[in-house]
């Protein structure tokens, strides 16, 4: 089954740590500039999604008891609807309010185009 979002092993390890510290988690990917283009991780429900946001994936991570939702602004999704996203983590501190900032690392997105087969399996 095709997915729109996956995580690297390093990102999964950090998400397990953040889950222990903060409880259930969520991501939001906006179309902003600079760090506004980075995926932001929040305690679940802290970032209010609206009718214009699209739920891309409910990520199941080993060792995390509940799925981590990954949301994107609707306008950004219209531009990225043919793109598969992989959440990774790298050294360095971002300038946003994402939960990983105090850890001295930041989440980032690695992307590739979805294949025709993947697109046929995905909604929208």
Image (cartoon, rainbow, N blue to C red):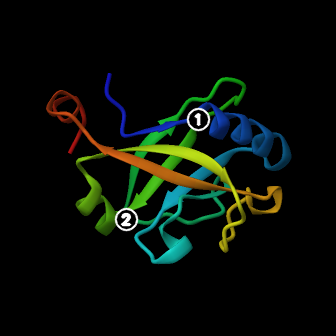
**Label 2 crowd bin: few (<14), some (14–19), many (20+), radius 10 Å:** few
- Which residue appears at 53% of the width and 63% of the height? 38
Q: Judge whether 22 appears above or below 94 on screen.
A: above
Q: Quadrant of the N terminus?
A: top left
| Residue 14 x %, y % | 73, 41
**Which residue corresponds to mark 2?**
51
Query: Of all residues shown, which one is farthest toward the right?
Result: 21
Tell me the quadrant of the picture where the C terminus can be found: top left
Residue pointed to by mark 1: 67
Q: Residue at x 23, y 48 (%)?
A: 82
Q: Secondary structure at mark 1?
A: loop
Q: Nearer the viewer, mark 2 or mark 1?
A: 1
Rendering quarter of residue 67: top right
Q: From what the image shows, is residue 27 above or below residue 67? A: below
Q: Residue 49: horizontal and vertical position, in percent? A: 49, 63
Tell me the quarter of the picture where residue 32 sits. Answer: bottom left
Residue 4 % position (x, y)? 36, 40
Q: Gap in Å between the C-alphas at discs 2 and 1?
A: 21 Å
Horizontally, is 70 left or right of 97 in the view? left
In the rendered view, tell whether residue 98 sits above or below residue 111: below
Horizontal relation, residue 99 to residue 112: left or right: right
Q: Judge from the rendering whether residue 100 lies leftward or rightward of residue 52; answer left or right.
A: right
């Amino acid at each position: 089954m095709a997915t729109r979002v996956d995580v690297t092993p390093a990102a999964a390890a950090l998400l397990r740590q953040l889950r222990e510290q903060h409880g259930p988690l969520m991501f939001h990917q906006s179309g902003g500039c600079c760090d506004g283009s980075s995926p932001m991780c929040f305690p679940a429900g802290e970032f209010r999604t609206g009718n214009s946001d699209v739920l891309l994936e409910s990520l199941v991570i080993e060792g995390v008891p509940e799925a981590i939702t990954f949301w994107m602004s609707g306008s950004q999704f219209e531009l990225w609807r043919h793109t598969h996203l992989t959440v990774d983590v790298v050294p360095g501190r971002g300038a946003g309010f994402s939960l990983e900032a105090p850890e001295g690392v930041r989440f980032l997105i690695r992307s590739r185009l979805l294949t025709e087969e993947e697109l046929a399996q995905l909604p929208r």
